[in-house]
Image (cartoon, rainbow, N blue to C red):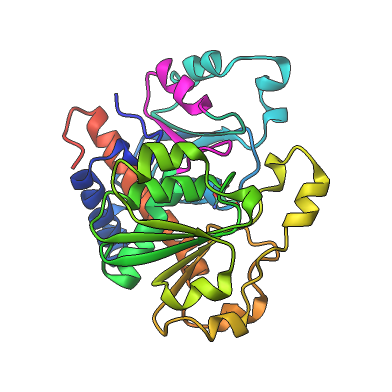
């Protein structure tokens, strides 16, 4: 049984197949409107979500399937003290595939150990968010045309930002990729990402503080919000939350074909004036999320039927 807990749970060739399938869906969505007839997706969300949950639901409905689920821990039996292991044992009888978001790192992995259906991690604490990464990769493939020979800047909360951790892991597999990690000292990427992902893959990276100084070199700028819910102390959050604000003045320093991505939600870190810049692609990125999730659901269910993933 295949589960998607981290982005590299798909091999490079499986990832390629996923993105190609997503692009085929973009070309002719009607061709897939019955692909998951009589199949059911369960969405178990123990943390708030707009895009991830609704795009998964839209994806399953677009494929002719159905959806059940809950959108907060308070409305599930977690509020009564049920373990995730027990919840997934039960949900395995109600659905064919399941998506889990949880504030605790590793919770979807624990669920996968007790599950009879594929589990997809939709964000576990400050750890990983593989389907956001697939969305980001489809955006880059579609709008930039390549993953290699890119200088990618990550800016904001690199410590708690799970979308950053997953995208760094996925992009580290491509040749000639270089990262510029832009953050205040308190929000630098965790040591384990350097030790387990960047160093073993010999990926060049630098850690800097100034967005203005870094932006002229970038092919992609991945902006993130400061993850308030992961802070222990509100004062630190308030002190750090507006460290970076991308505005038209800073965009004027960037390459003409640099892309600005953001997993959303945006709080203050991108001024509204940037939205009209053709290089700002974060709303297009959210649209790509539906297609890549359609492709992922199809591939995982296909594998359950004993067919190969790609
Ligand atoms: C992200 C998340 O939940 O990690 N959002 C998303 O899924 N699109 C990023 C965030 O919340 O800042």
- Taking the spot 52% from the left edge, 48% from the top edge, the residue there is 52
Question: How many numbered marks appear?
Answer: 0
Determine the image quadrant of residue 96: top left
- Taking the spot 40% from the left edge, 50% from the top edge, the residue there is 168
In front of the other: 205 or 280:
205
Looking at the picture, does residue 274 appear above or below residue 195?
below
- Taking the spot 69% from the left edge, 63% from the top edge, the residue there is 243
Image x and y of residue 229, in percent: 71, 42
- Indicate left or right for 68 with 40 as reference: right
- Indicate left or right for 239 with 308 as reference: right
- Report if residue 104 is visible in the image: yes
Image x and y of residue 9, in percent: 31, 36
- Report if residue 62 is visible in the image: no
Quadrant location of the C terminus?
top left
- Taking the spot 56% from the left edge, 83% from the top edge, the residue there is 276
Image x and y of residue 31, in percent: 26, 57
Looking at the picture, does residue 109 appear above or below residue 81?
below
Determine the image quadrant of residue 102: top right
In front of the other: 283 or 294:
283
Q: Which span is picked out in magenta?
A: 106-129
Looking at the picture, does residue 306 appear above or below residue 121?
above
- Indicate left or right for 85 with 152 as reference: right
Any magenta on residue 41?
no
Image x and y of residue 71, in percent: 63, 37
In front of the other: 243 or 96:
243
């Amino acid at each position: 049984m295949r589960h998607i807990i981290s982005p590299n749970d798909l091999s490079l060739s499986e990832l390629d197949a996923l993105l190609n399938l997503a692009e085929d869906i973009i070309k002719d969505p009607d061709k897939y409107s019955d692909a998951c007839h009589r199949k059911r997706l369960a969405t178990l969300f123990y943390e708030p979500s707009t895009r991830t949950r609704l795009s998964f639901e839209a994806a399953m409905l677009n494929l002719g399937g159905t959806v059940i689920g809950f959108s907060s821990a308070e409305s599930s039996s977690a509020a009564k003290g049920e373990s995730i292991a027990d919840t997934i044992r039960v949900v395995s009888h109600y659905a064919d595939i399941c998506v889990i978001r949880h504030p605790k790192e590793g919770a979807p992995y624990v669920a996968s150990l007790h599950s009879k259906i594929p589990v997809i991690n939709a964000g576990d604490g400050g750890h990983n968010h593989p389907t956001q990464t697939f969305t980001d990769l489809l955006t880059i493939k579609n709008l930039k045309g390549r993953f290699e020979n890119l200088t990618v800047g990550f800016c904001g909360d690199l410590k708690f930002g799970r979308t950053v951790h997953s995208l760094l892991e996925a992009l580290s597999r491509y040749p000639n990729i270089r990262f510029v990690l832009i953050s205040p000292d308190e929000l630098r990427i965790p040591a384990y990402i350097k030790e387990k992902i960047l160093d073993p893959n010999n990926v060049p990276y630098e850690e800097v503080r100034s967005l203005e100084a870094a932006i002229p070199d970038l092919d992609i700028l991945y902006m993130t919000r400061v993850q308030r819910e992961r802070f222990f102390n509100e004062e630190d959050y308030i002190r750090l939350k507006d460290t970076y604000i991308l505005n038209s003045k800073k965009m004027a320093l960037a390459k003409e074909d640099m892309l600005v991505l953001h997993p959303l939600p945006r709080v203050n870190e991108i001024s509204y004036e940037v939205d009209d810049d053709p290089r700002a692609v974060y709303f297009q990125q959210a649209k790509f999320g539906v297609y890549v999730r359609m492709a992922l659901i199809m591939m995982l269910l296909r594998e359950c039927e004993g067919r190969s993933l790609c």
